[in-house]
Image (cartoon, rainbow, N blue to C red):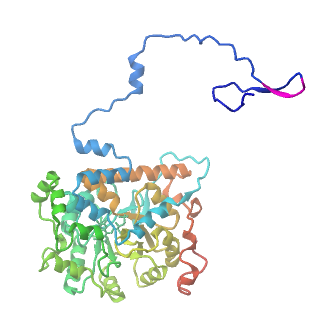
Amino acid sequence: MTNPESGPEMVAPTRAEAPDGAAAWVRPAPPMKAPAPRVTRRMPRWSEVRELVQFRRPTADPVRRRLEGALTIGDLRRLARRTTPRAVFDYVDGSADEGVTVARNRAAFRDVTFLPEALHAVKDPDLSTDLLGRRISMPFVFAPTGYTRMMHHHGEAGVARVAQRNGLPYALSTVGTSSIEEVHEAAPEGDNWFQLYLTNNEALNEELVDRALAAGVTTAVLTIDTAVAGRRLLDVRNGLTIPPSLTLQTFLDMSRFPYWWVNKLTTPPVEFASLRDFPGTSADVAALLFDPGLDYDDLAWLRRRWPHNLLVKGVLNPADAERVVAMGADGVVVSNHGGRQLDRTPATLHMLPAVRAAVGPESTVILDSGVTHGQDIVAAMALGADAVMAGRAYLYGIMAGGERGVERAVEILRAEYQRGLQLLGLDATSKIARHHVSIPGGEAWPPSDRRPEGTWPAGSWV
Ligand SMILES: Cc1cc2nc3c(=O)[nH]c(=O)nc-3n(C[C@H](O)[C@H](O)[C@H](O)COP(=O)(O)O)c2cc1C
């Protein structure tokens, strides 16, 4: 008997009664061969083909060409890796110790579940929002990052110009390679913030505050998660340390990037520009900046001294958030320094709801660390942030194409953010609400036995 399941090409047989009453497999007659259907043909028309194949106009500008091909921040990262010496790329991309925190930050965003609302008109959504008394074009702030001119000679001034053009704040770092004054000159109308590392040199602290005031800085950001420098193993291995001790391999790799070298050697030296006049080597300055003596008295001093908005960056613990706000800070930046300082901390997104509950609705809460997609911004806003900060996202852009690369990073994030809002059924940033997202695991953090008693409203955090 033929096995009915053998041979995929066979027509399925049917079961029939044999004359002796036994069941037998009967193969049905093959279907009659139908004639091929008649197709009416005509001459091809070029105009129709042209509609299908829209050739892009070739561009002789290689930066433009590669940036146009970048559709995600991940694409910019890949370009940055190709265009920048490996040690410099590693300095940006790398993280502390085993990279547990940096992976958690990303995983937390990927684990977010969005729940859309049906049938709302979402044409031309309003992406803007209020942040610290100003209207900004979307809830995004350029995080402070040191050494930006090492990544690309356009440096901090280029980032500040992009921020100004896009109606977004830019936070210059104390260890920026352009000074407070240079950034002010590059973007005089910009919402220019200044990130402070307070040192045990009071005169220097005073001077930095005065210069920031004179340059019209609107917001000071005190970074508090750098009591000592995190251990970035890639930098140690590449010899990109302070003072530098480049390995031969690092040096040889750098020689593959003549464009980068020429720009380094023909533009002002890469140095801590706001600390230019400070006597001593870069190692002396670095030793001063990572101050293990920083404590709440320093925050109290800065609050007395700084008359404008003051944010504290590097807060993860809701109890700390509550305390700094009680001391007069206008808000906090929930940050683990992008996984570059203490490794094995929780993802900032998971701490965000508890921090928001601790400081209440009036204080500013900015979510930082791991933002690489516009939908990350949507998630952070739903979980209680007023805006996000990102560092690497725009640094990949600057490495890939200087100022235009930063612009591209903003374009990508803005388009993703807008599409995220629209597909959620929302026509404005202000419509994002807690019920639009859920975060598995996040709700359970921190475990109740690790929550200091009475430090933030019990039960009010999600
Ligand atoms: C290359 C680099 C340099 C940084 N320098 C500083 C700095 O000088 N001051 C500071 O407060 N944070 C600094 N940060 C941390 C950023 O402000 C921000 O917290 C971090 O980049 C957020 O994580 P993300 O890169 O995943 O967005 C730096 C980050 C990077 C990547």
Residue 227: name its quadrant: bottom left
User: Is 22 within the magenta?
Assistant: yes
Residue 175 placement (x, y as % from top left): 23, 71
24 lies left or right of 384: right
Magenta part of the chain: 20-25
At a point 42% along the width and 20% down the height, the residue shown is 48
Which quarter holds ligand 1? bottom left
Residue 79 placement (x, y as % from top left): 29, 50
Q: Is residue 449 depicted above or below 367 in this figure?
A: below
Q: Nearer the viewer, residue 155 or 258?
A: 258
Q: Nearer the viewer, residue 439 or 123?
A: 439
Residue 417 placement (x, y as % from top left): 45, 53
Q: Is residue 148 depicted above or below 424 in this figure?
A: below
Q: Is residue 151 depicted above or below 353 in this figure?
A: above
Q: Is residue 15 depicted above or below 104 in this figure?
A: above
The reply to whether residue 146 is visible in this rendering is: no
At a point 17% along the width and 67% down the height, the residue shown is 246
User: Is 330 within the magenta?
Assistant: no
Q: The N terminus lies in which quarter of the figure? A: top right
